[in-house]
Amino acid sequence: MGENGMGQGGLPLLLGVMGDPIIHSKSPAIHGAALAACGIDGKYVPLHVKANQLEEAIKGIRALGFRGVNVTVPHKVEVMKYLDHLDDGARYIGAVNTIVNDEGRLIGYNTDGIGYIRSLQEEVVPDLSGKSVLVLGSGGAARGIIYALLLQKPRSVVVANRTEQKAKELATDLSHLGNIAGCGMDRVKEYIQGIDVVINTTSVGMFPNIEEMPIDPDLIPNGIIVSDLIYNPLKTELLRHAELKGCQIHNGLGMFLYQGAYAFEYWTGCSAPIDFMRKAVMDSLH
Ligand code: ATR
């Protein structure tokens, strides 16, 4: 990157997001707002990349002088083999959502999990150390979140999943980072007492199936923290029930914003203007 957040040789800083489909991505909105708020001459563009053109597209980052890109569905795993280096988080999680072009060397990061944890800390629970956390679901999103969560030294993490085997595998994979156990979703009632934070990482309750919930809400203890990665709708049925039980609630909008904030900071070296980014995504939702 050149001086003053500009691209090389005084050209605009080139950024983008690769995915298929890509037309509905909100990333151009948040990064466009962030570039403008920081006074950086840059462009962040949606890039429609099919799976069979991913390798060529990644080479194009270097050839075209992009400073970096985000990578979204369906390329987050596949893209790893075309990069020059992976940071520890991306390697543990097994997926990349952010690429930094460091003078031709492509470095892969995963900012989803750390973005989620930063949003949880900024918005509801500043200190996660010593907390007991129940994570519902054990897919790609859960893996990133649990990786970042264990770095905060919680007392314990239980991961519950419809397919019990996947929860157990995830717990085994990350067990060297902290106290974690896996179980089937049917055993949540045994584990949920004494839990401080519940995090839903499953897609249950997402538009259009907004009446669904990943667990029986009667199981949720009064007054704890309940977080849902979903942000369409902003308040899922799970969060609505949790609020009625006096819980503090947290939705997935912050995860989206802060995964973008980390990426923006990696690319530009500037602190992400989170309020401008939040306004941009809220405007684009309406
Ligand atoms: P993501 O990257 O968003 O985590 P994923 O890797 O496909 O997506 O994982 C989806 C998660 O949601 C899984 O934990 C999945 O449970 P299974 O492993 O049993 O498939 C969970 N999930 C999806 N639909 C579900 C449903 N109707 N009921 C319960 N869990 C569901």
Image: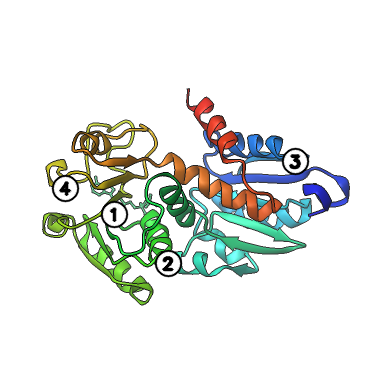
Q: Earlier in the sequence, mark 1 or mark 2?
A: 1
- Mark 2 packing: few (<14 Cα in 10 Å), some, or many (20+)? some
Q: Secondary structure at mark 2?
A: loop
From the top left corner, tell me how far across and down residue 190 is, in percent.
Answer: 11, 59
> In the drawing, does residue 44 fall left or right of residue 261?
right
Q: Earlier in the sequence, mark 4 or mark 3?
A: 3
Which disc is residue 221 wearing?
4
| Mark 1 CB near ligand 1 (8 Å cut) | yes
Q: Which residue is mark 2?
A: 151
> In the drawing, does residue 142 fall left or right of residue 185?
right
**Mark 4 to mark 1: distance in Å?**
19 Å
**Mark 1 to mark 2: distance in Å?**
19 Å
Q: Secondary structure at mark 1?
A: loop
**Mark 1 to mark 3: distance in Å?**
38 Å
**Mark 4 to mark 3: distance in Å?**
47 Å
Callouts 1 and 3 close, C-beta under 8 Å: no
Callouts 4 and 2 close, C-beta under 8 Å: no
Question: Residue 214, relative to residue 92: is it above or below?
Answer: above
User: Can the viewer see residue 9?
Assistant: yes
Callouts 4 and 3 close, C-beta under 8 Å: no
User: Can the viewer see residue 49?
Assistant: no
> Which of the two discs, 3 and 2, sits closer to the camera?
2
In depth, the one of 197 and 168 nearer the eye is 197
Q: Which residue is mark 3?
A: 42
- Mark 4 packing: few (<14 Cα in 10 Å), some, or many (20+)? many
Badge 2 amino acid = Leu
Badge 4 amino acid = Pro
Q: Which residue is mark 1?
A: 137
Q: Quadrant of residue 85?
A: bottom right
In depth, the one of 232 and 196 nearer the eye is 196
Q: Earlier in the sequence, mark 4 or mark 1?
A: 1
